[in-house]
Image (cartoon, helix red, strand yellow):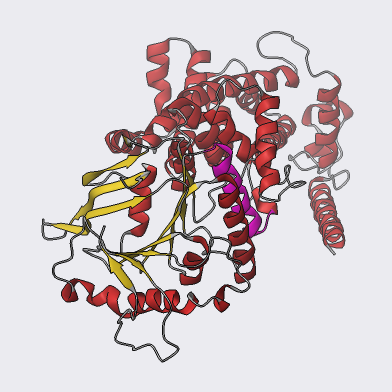
Amino acid sequence: MIDKFISIEGIAKRYPGADGGAIAVFENLWLSLPRGEFGCVIGHSGCGKTTVLNILAGLDQPSDGVVIVDGQAIEGTSLDRAVIFQSHALLPWRTVMGNVAYAVSSKWRGWDKAKVRAHAQTFIDLVGLTGAEHKHPSELSGGMKQRVGIARALSITPKIMLMDEPFSALDALTRGSLQDEVRRICLETGQTTFMITHDVDEAMYLADKIYLMTNGPGAVLAEVVENPLPKDRVRIDLHRHPYYYALRNHIVDFLVTRSKTFASMTPDHDPRRVPVVRPQLSEPALVPASGSHGPAQASAR
Amino acid sequence: MTRSLRLRAALISVLIFAAFIGSWHLATRGTGAVATMTPEYAKLMGLTATQGKSAMPGPLDVGAKLWEHMRRPFYDNGPNDKGLGIQLGYSIARVGLGYLLAVVVAIPLGFLIGMSPLLNKALDPFIQILKPISPLAWMPLALYTIKDSGLSAIFVIFICSVWPMLLNTAFGVASVRKEWINVARTLEVGTVRRAFTVILPAAAPTILTGMRISIGIAWLVIVAAEMLVGGTGLGYWIWNEWNNLSITNIMIGILLIGLVGMLLDQILARATRLVTFPE
């Protein structure tokens, strides 16, 4: 049996349309992620990827379907599922320590102040913010703020960590170092993580599984791409790996062309059995622009 | 740069003040003897007739009188002759009580309205109608119902300071950033703890701004209310001095109202700054 630590089963999200009917952002979406893996949903704006994450977080309810985490259907928000928000969402009247301690004391209500602070300090140290404990968010740079967001999410030792385009508001250099940080922490702690992004390189560096979503409305999960790059990949020479361009071209081709044409090109797409693709070595020749995925192997699960 | 700006501003303020006092003094000073009359008759006529002095008191008269009040602020010679400190104390006590009552009612109610769109819509017509009513219009009704002029004045202060606080609290609570609420939700923070740890601090600057507007209005209204109910307080004292035709005391009263109003406003401004957070 396939390990389905997170299992999204047939969820839909519909909004009432102007003519009285319902507009579906997505219908009958199935998706699963094994324990300890890093999953990344990639797609254009408006495909409903943030809605998927909000449903997973419990901040939004699906119109249909269920989400099962660790064998239990989720109901509302939970301390088992920590969210890292795009806008970091730190409480500006609290210090770095105050923000992390707020999460810690929310999870362990009975802990005394010293214990809460000691626990929070561990995670502030983990994200490299030692010495900035007493600063307020307004005194921090964008990257440091998001580090606090990560520390806050990790401090409650969640079963899954949910990230909604966490680095999209940061400059390229900061984004790179934070990606390194997240990758290190996730590998060290075996944290199951689910992330939303529209950055191909980010997905390739961080994710074990990349979920490709077509354009909305009526978006579907088109493919699950297994990352063929080695687990011990380093960002600096990622692009020298033989599989790098096969993977990159595959995703970019999808985003540029197939995300628009997928529904018409694949009428028999079964949303319960989404093909799993593992891009392999591609020929050194030019990749046809028609969106063919070359020597990629497709196998249904 | 800022230092020199502040210095220059202070200098100009002092100059304006000096010019004002100077022209006031020149405009009200005596022109010397205008008529010769027997000393007994001159005593009866007063300085206005004999020395050509203006009927308006000059700054020196006001200053001297003020000094006199400050030396004996708390004397009590019966209902119509109490020290200025006592009158001021009555006014501040009334404003304080009415204002406190308004805080106790407006902030929890504003919280409810801000958190519930249903209540917001349901209560909106009442608030819209009640808000523009001049607080003094309530006075007869208050006197008739409460049957106590002192309590009626407190009620009038309550009713005039409740609206800005209520509306600002409701607005502040309703416009707390969604993401902060979501943080509390993902951390499974209960409603009460969420109200105190997220909504209250986030809305505090807006709530305190409402409280600052309220204290200003309350201080405006207390003078008028005390003129109506009589007995004690700065408003009553000014009206009493008008009946005594003591323009000097009226001026002192006006000055005192301004100073205390500024002080109250500054206290609330300081408090607002304490709860304001930079983003």
Q: In the figure, B191 relative to B279: above or below? A: above
- The question of residue A149 being in magenta is answered with yes
Give the magenta-colored segment's residue range: A140-157
Could you say which is closer to the camera, residue A143 or residue B112?
A143
**Observer able to see residue B151:** yes
Quarter of the image with the N terminus of chain B is bottom right
Compared with B36, A204 (above or below) is below
Q: Is residue A278 above or below residue B154?
A: below
Q: Residue at x 65, y 42 (%)?
A: A123
Relative to A51, B84 lies left or right: right
Magenta includes A76? Answer: no
Residue that protrudes farthest toward the bottom in the picture: A285
In the rendered image of this protein, does residue A127 appear above or below residue B201? below
User: Residue B229 placed where, x, y %?
Assistant: 52, 19
B266 left or right of B109?
Answer: right
- Residue A212, given in percent of the width and then of the height, sits at 34, 66
Q: Residue at x 81, y 51 (%)?
A: B17
